[in-house]
Image: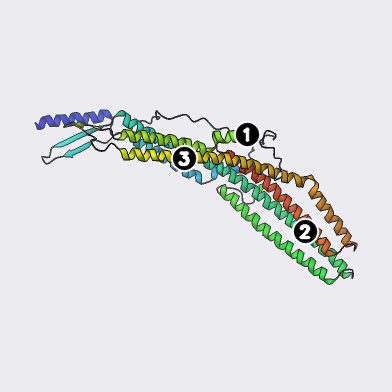
Amino acid sequence: MNRTRLKCLAACAALLVLAGCATVPPRQAAQDSTVVPPALPSPEVIARVFPGESPPKAPQDQNGKALSLAQVRKIALEKNPSFAEYAAHRAAANAELLQALAYPNPDFEIGLELLPNLFLPIEPSAKRQTRAAAAEAAKPVVDRSEELFRAALSADVAKAYCTVLHAERAVTLAGEALHTEQEIEQVVARRVDGGEAPEIDRIRAQVETLKASRAVQAQQRQNATARVILNTLCGRSLPTDFTLTDHLNQALGEADEAQARQIALAQHPVLRHFDALLKQKELVIQREQKAWQPNLRVGVPVGLEIPLRDRNKGGIAAAQAELQEVQAEQARIRQEVERDVETGVQTYEGAREQRAAFEGGLRAAAAESLHIETTMYEEGEVDLLQLLDVRRTARQTEAEYLQALYDAQVARIELERAIGVGGTAE
């Protein structure tokens, strides 16, 4: 009897070796996986949504420190540390797939009679296939999540880039305002020394110069902060004394709202992420529906699990609830994408109109008025208060024009974010 039992155990051991239970099978694609169509590259999206614009120049490798927006975006997409997290998530998804594809381990027991028992669990093929398909579906979810982050990072970098440009120009304007105040102070000093103006004018001019000097310092601090933010988005990889080659006054074309909405609803990274997530949840339901199927136990003696009570109803219900939750969230996000595109187009066009108003001659008129009033004050035809009022108007006009340039660029960036530009790896 014992000899017969040992022969059976030997046969089972040979069966285990032949079946390859101790090894992990080669990776295979899930049967239910679907091919996700590639998203349009960013240049093509820009060409369709802004048809009146010239295509941007391709970034060129430079050894210097002058960087275009395209170059800074490229650095950020290579050096931002958050991409290491997605690499870890992808490795975890691969590990989950390997675990799903592994065969069940054999059971080895020694009873009271000190006789060994060896059992080989054999799963139904459908049970194992659905488990592998659900694990395989986790990888596209990670990929789509990375696309979503890439698009957000691209927009954040562009906005930070424009913020640095705005801060640098603000420093320049503050310096020009300080120079103007110093010139006015000299004019006032000459008139006061000549007895043509009261001493209070000298004090007023000195106060305005001091205020202008403090404004320069404040703008310099803001510029330093903006540069730190941009460098951090790029993984602290930018040169210490980098300069930017693009400008805030670059031409901006009219947006095609219909194209923007169509492209956003077809390929926005957040919607592609939900598509992958829905597919994963559907495969999880199939996995849970097959999980109750009994395993055959080949050994001495032969056994079979009988699911008399537990048919995994709880697991199936939980998986179905997760699917319904994702479906509801996807419907909400889809409406939000469409809303963001519509409001983004309106904001963008309004910003373009505001910018055009300043470029239509308003700035030149303010500058000319300041020049005329300064000359008239020097000749004694107007008082200092009137000169200071004109000077404030000219300075405010330049500041508001700079803000209009910045607002137009930011509105453009936010519109591209609403469309989902920048999600593809290019």
Q: Left or right of 270: which side holds 373?
A: right
Nearest to the observer: residue 37 or residue 106:
37
- The answer to whether the residue labelled 2 contacts the one labelled 1, judged by CB atoms less than 8 Å apart, is no
Q: Residue at x 22, y 29 (%)?
A: 14
Crowd tier of the residue under label 3, counting other residues whose Cα lies within 10 Å: few below 14, some 14–19, many 20 or above: few
Q: Which residue is mark 1?
A: 258
Figure check: 326 above or below 129: below
Crowd tier of the residue under label 1, counting other residues whose Cα lies within 10 Å: few below 14, some 14–19, many 20 or above: few
Task: State the separation of the CA atoms marked 3 and 1.
Answer: 25 Å
- The answer to whether the residue labelled 3 contacts the one labelled 2, judged by CB atoms less than 8 Å apart, is no
Task: State the separation of the CA atoms marked 3 and 2.
Answer: 54 Å
Nearest to the observer: residue 134 or residue 262:
262
Mark 2 or 1, closer to the camera: 1
Q: Can the viewer see residue 41? A: no
SS for callout 2: helix
Q: Left or right of 187: which side holds 144?
A: left
Q: Residue at x 48, y 44 (%)?
A: 84
Q: Which residue is mark 3?
A: 328
Task: State the separation of the CA atoms marked 2 and 1.
Answer: 43 Å
Q: Which residue is mark 2?
A: 392
